[in-house]
Amino acid sequence: MDSNNTAAMDYITARLGSPEAPALAFGGDYNPEQWPEETWTEDVRLMREAGVNLVSVGIFSWSLLEPSEGAYEFGWLDRVLDLLHANGIRVDLANATASPPPWFSHKYPQSLPITADGVRHSYGSRQAFAASSPEYRRAAAALTEQIAGRYSDHPAVVMWHVHNEYGCHNQPDFSDGAAAGFRSWLERRYGSLDGLNTAWGTAFWSQRYSAWAEILPPRTSGTWVNPTQQLDFARYSSDELLECYKAEAAIIRSHSPHPVTTNFMGFNMGLHQPVDYWRWAEQMDVVSNDHYLIAEDRRNFQELAATADLTRGWAKGKPWLLMEHSTSAVNWQPRNIAKAPGELLRNSMQHVARGADGALFFQWRASRAGAEKFHSGLLPHTGTDTKVWREVVQLGQALRSLAEVSGSVVTGASGRVDVTIIHDTDARWASELDSHPSVDASNIAETRRWHDAFYRAGIPTDFRQSTDDLSGYRLVVAPMQYLLSDSGAANLDGYVRAGGHLVITYFSGIVDENDHIRLGSYPGAFSGLLGVQMEEFLPLRAGEAVRLSGFGPGTCWNELGKATTAEVLAVVDEGPAAGSPAVTRNHAGSGRAYYVATTLAPEGLSELLTVFCADAAVLPLIPELPANVEIGRRSKDGTDWTFCINHGTDDVRLPLPGAGLTGVELLSGADLNGGLSLAAGAVAVVRSRNSPLMGEPASPSTNHSIHSSH
Ligand code: GAL
């Protein structure tokens, strides 16, 4: 299988259905080892009832598959896979390396990870290993060899699940093994100590290194450890862990043609849990992601949407797989709010609308024992006469009705996604380093604000890196790209000069890839392109806002400075930055570059978006999208599927003409020849050919109402 994600998802959906009629994936983690064998028959019966077609098996089974070193017991797994196969349920088979057994950690205590404070993790939870441990790598390779060798031809297996959520609990590791690995990584990166000393700016605070052996991971010290050292350690830690994945994936690929993946964790991998998914994604046959709602956030569906779009970015726009989400509550948040009626369907449909070719869950049967016994499952503790089970069955039906969507790509009003947000891992990590101008200046928060604004406007957005080819996008937004490599800066500059529209927010292009300030006017990499010269950052107090002459108010930050060639769209109206530009527009080459020097509230941001979109000829999928309604579109071979999801408590009517809202509503099978009324909480997916052009008069016709199932 190619590591390019092109055909791999199709490979799977063809095996879940048939090559002529592929099926979307539906199912989840199946942990039969937690239950007596008699239960398995009921499991598969109920899986069939719900329409489950894919389960992930064996993720946490190492201690049962290898009860003592080199002694393997596969009998139970043979029986499980045979049973699933006999019932037509396909398997995403794990290589079980995510949780080393007690015998392993007990025998090889040096394999356990060490925190920045020098505390060695104990075992007794999961992921108790250091990525650099040769003992762990040897044991994981041996187990992978056994599993891949034994099951590569098993007819139930269609894909491989390496490990589980790499780095979730053991990243980064500050052990001596990591120190040695870090030094080798640095030698490869810099070639010489002089190179390292320059890159790390070690003239500051007397940090000059005179031998490689002196270099350590950024362990706890009296105060801030050298920022470039921290950044390089994050880069190294991601690479070291990726070596574990690559080694295990290579073993599997030597036995089997099925696609290989490991499940990602969305936005969660910050500087202190570093895994650079852009680099990891290159090693995946299929990009897969786990997503859990932030239960207490009443607009958590917007965070879901952003994560799903980011996942599609890692998949380079191709279909991807939602490996885990939850049917209802999780167990690991302070207050684990259960999903409201209909939320399960809405959440799954959001992922599908944004490019997932299926919806899988953690986990099939809610556990009876262990740390996750209060986590929901497809099959609750309380059985099948339950809200959750009924909604699971309903989702299975919905996914079957939408099977034709598989293999399609996400599109915008022009027939392709017109807007992308830049999200470089290095920029995020570096922005999370300590001793910055304001703790409130957050790359993730700013990224989310911009994504939310496009979401509310009904404009689909991709995510890309600053170094990617951006020429297909009408509008590119780079929110708080604090760190930018020279090549990223040159790429963005070239994009504008060739006719693109680029929005840069404050605290972008400030440092190079070594976290050294780009000297001259702020924002360093972009002052010329933007036609502004900013001289001082003026972060605001917590809760403080400044009046702007337009799009205001501004919070978090403003800047002292002036426009050189830029047209000023709004200035700061009060305080020490009074008269300084807050929003500007500059012509450069045949394109335009915009600067936003503060954080705008949602209303101001939405207003400003209309300016950018008018300049860049970006249209929403539907004009005047009602509040709390989400819209998305997928397309393939001249057919569009428009997803309309009502997260609100009011029934709405979607205005026409719009994005293909004539055709067949696939969840109900109803013909739509005109408007669409969507009840509170309801979901509609409309298939149409050749969606009507925006502004075309609506044909007189019947309306159809989509009722919420509740
Ligand atoms: C994921 C993990 C699963 C399960 C789930 C609970 O992070 O992959 O194994 O723990 O969270 O929400």
Image (cartoon, rainbow, N blue to C red):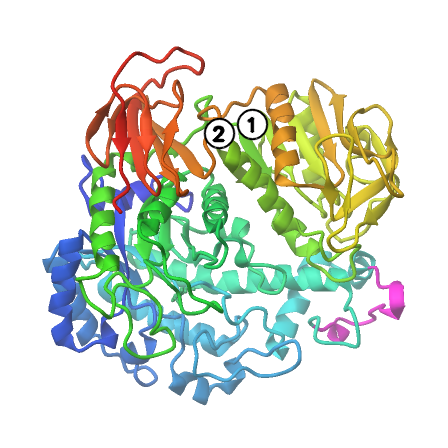
504 part of magenta stretch: no
Residue 406 location (% of width, % of height)? 29, 38
Q: Nearer the viewer, residue 349 or 572?
A: 572
Quadrant field for ligand 1: bottom left
Q: Is residue 194 visible?
A: yes
To which residue does mark 2 refer? 417
Q: Residues within 10 Å of mark 1 (few under 14, many from 20)?
A: many
CA distance separating discs 1 and 2: 7 Å
207 part of magenta stretch: yes
Residue 519 location (% of width, % of height)? 87, 44
Q: Main secondary structure of the magenta part?
A: loop
Identify the residue at image location x=35%, y=59%: 326
Which segment is the magenta one?
201-216
The answer to whether the residue labelled 1 contacts the one labelled 2, judged by CB atoms less than 8 Å apart, is: yes
**In the image, is residue 540 above or below residue 600?**
below
To which residue does mark 1 refer? 473
